[in-house]
Amino acid sequence: MSDGIMKRMGLIFRSKANKALDRAEDPRETLDYSYQKQLELLQKVRRGVADVATSRKRLELQLTQLQQQSSKYEDQGRKALSLGREDLAREALSRKANLQTQITDLETQYQALQGEEEKLTLASQRLQAKVDAFRTKKETIKATYTAAQAQTRIAESFSGISEEMGDVGLAIQRAEDKTAQMQARAGAIDELLASGALDDASGLGRKDDIEAELERVAGGSDVELELARMKAELTGGTPASQPQAIEQGKNDTPPPTINYNK
């Protein structure tokens, strides 16, 4: 396998792994982990301060004991000298001198530990302030991220709803178009049946010639009656008299003569 293919495969693998890590990574968990590490560091600094303070306190106790012993040698030398025992007084003062050397060394160590304790205490206080500030910022970022995540989910939900509503809208539009098409088709068929262009196979709506003629005459009579009524209104007469006259004229027609000679 060539180097080019290996490099390409490595690049693809790294890109896939990076994408998977991006999906798996939660910034809130990363922030909590960083905060936990800072707390652990702060705890170590505090333990260091406590250890230095303990050492300083131990030196302080040793200094107190040596100073008390030095004072005791001084008192013993003074008493020995008052009793005329100059040799004992000299020995007591010699021992006091040796203790003073130790006291001086311990005081130097004590001052160094005291300075170290002050530095560690100041560093602990500063680190505590940074940890507190990080905790506040961490909670703010976590709240903002949670809100953004919720907004993203809501937006995605609305996007899905919008797509579904779009599908519903298309379905409604197709149903309305189909309904309008069926209504138009039904109206056209009714018009064709009424005009006689299409035959009614059921026979229920078919009319023979006599019935059609009767309906035409009835329609014409209605028109004549309406026209007579309008004329009567214009002339001030009684519209009912004209139909009665027409009827009477029809009744006064003599019956036909029957010729029996034929």
Image: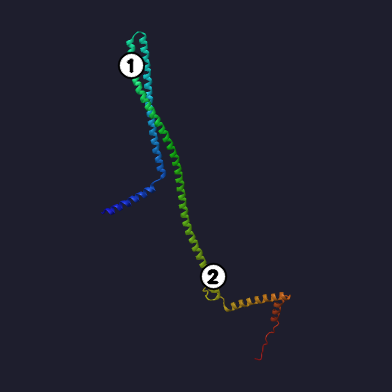
Query: On the image, numbered disc 1 is attached to which residue?
Result: 95
- The colour scheme is rainbow
Q: For the residues marked 1 and 2, what is the alpha-carbon distance in whole angstroms?
A: 134 Å
Amino acid type, label 2 = Gly
Q: Where does the image place residue 83, in percent across and percent down from the top left?
A: 36, 8
Q: Where does the image place residue 248, in percent across and percent down from the top left?
A: 71, 80
Q: Where does the image place residue 251, in percent across and percent down from the top left?
A: 70, 81
Indicate left or right for 5 with 151 as reference. Answer: left
- Residue 255 drawn above or below residue 106: below
- Please tell me which residue is depicted at 37% across the width and 21% down the height of the picture: 63
Q: Secondary structure at mark 1?
A: helix
- Please tell me which residue is depicted at 33% across the width and 11% down the height of the picture: 88
Q: Earlier in the sequence, mark 1 or mark 2?
A: 1
In the image, 52 versus 13, the foreground residue is 52
- Residue 187 has which mark? 2
- Please tell me which residue is depicted at 38% across the width and 26% down the height of the picture: 111
- Residue 11 drawn above or below residue 247: above
In the image, 213 versus 161, the foreground residue is 161
Indicate left or right for 129 with 240 as reference. Answer: left
